[in-house]
Image (cartoon, helix red, strand yellow):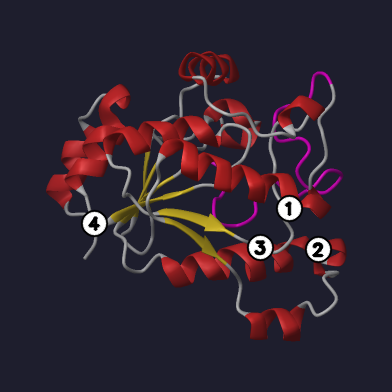
Amino acid sequence: MAVTHDELHHLDGTPETALLAVALRLLQGRIAVVSSFGTESALLLAMAAEIDPAVPVLFLETGRHFPETLAYRDILTQHLGLRDVRSIAPSPGALASRDPQNQLSHFDPDACCALRKVEPLDTILPPFDAWISGRKRSQATTRAALPTLERQPDGRLKINPLASWTPRDIDVEMTRRDLPRHPLAALGYTSIGCAPCTRPITEGEDPRAGRWSGMEKTECGIHQPT
């Protein structure tokens, strides 16, 4: 079942400050959070945990993450009392046939993301009518027009409750809540994906400049530029 017209109308009329709480309660059992457990992820997860610690949290375990990210996932899960964090991995058979040497990211990063992120997410999402992302307009020019609600072609709804938050807003609120920080944040990593395709940023670069650096690629494929 997709999100109904009445549900969408109700969410569309909800102030952004209350959107996460309303969505989690209105669509309980039909909604999930998709999280990278990156540098800013703790805030959205903390806010969700306060409302419903049993909300499913989907983490795409690509097999190419920094060890620090996997450790951070476990630390945050325990710290926030999240009860249903699911690590979603690509099919072993698909990995063996399409990337047996873990080299696909070096010559076809789009195919690597499709294999390790897009397809696993497509496999796990069908039970859910809506999912929540932590994307923000301030993260990159390709996200500057990001809406809070995105109706997907399949009828599913994507919700971006922190769309208008700035890096300073995030930092201040994470500090106020005394949330654990991703260990790579102190080393200049502002947006963290798979290790082969992520670098620290330099002064003046946008927060996502360290992702697929030197390529035209800006998104892994589970999101599209807005």
Q: Secondary structure at mark 4?
A: loop
Tell me the distance, in whole angstroms, between the alpha carbons under discs 3 and 2. Answer: 12 Å
The residue indicated by pointer 1 is 194
Tell me the distance, in whole angstroms, between the alpha carbons under discs 1 and 2. Answer: 10 Å
Tell me the distance, in whole angstroms, between the alpha carbons under discs 4 and 3. Answer: 26 Å
Q: Which mark is residue 105?
A: 2
The residue indicated by pointer 3 is 62
Within-10-Å neighbours for mark 1: few <14, some 14–19, many 20+: some
Q: Secondary structure at mark 1?
A: loop
Contact, CB < 8 Å: mark 1 with mark 2? Answer: yes
| N-term mark: 1 or 4 | 4
Amino acid type, residue under disc 1 in the picture: Cys
**What's the magenta region?**
203-226
Contact, CB < 8 Å: mark 1 with mark 4? Answer: no
Tell me the distance, in whole angstroms, between the alpha carbons under discs 4 and 2. Answer: 35 Å
Q: Is residue 190 above or below residue 106?
A: above
The residue indicated by pointer 4 is 29
Contact, CB < 8 Å: mark 1 with mark 3? Answer: yes
Within-10-Å neighbours for mark 2: few <14, some 14–19, many 20+: some
Amino acid type, residue under disc 3 in the picture: Thr
Toward the viewer: 110 or 189? 189
User: Is 35 contained in the magenta span?
Assistant: no
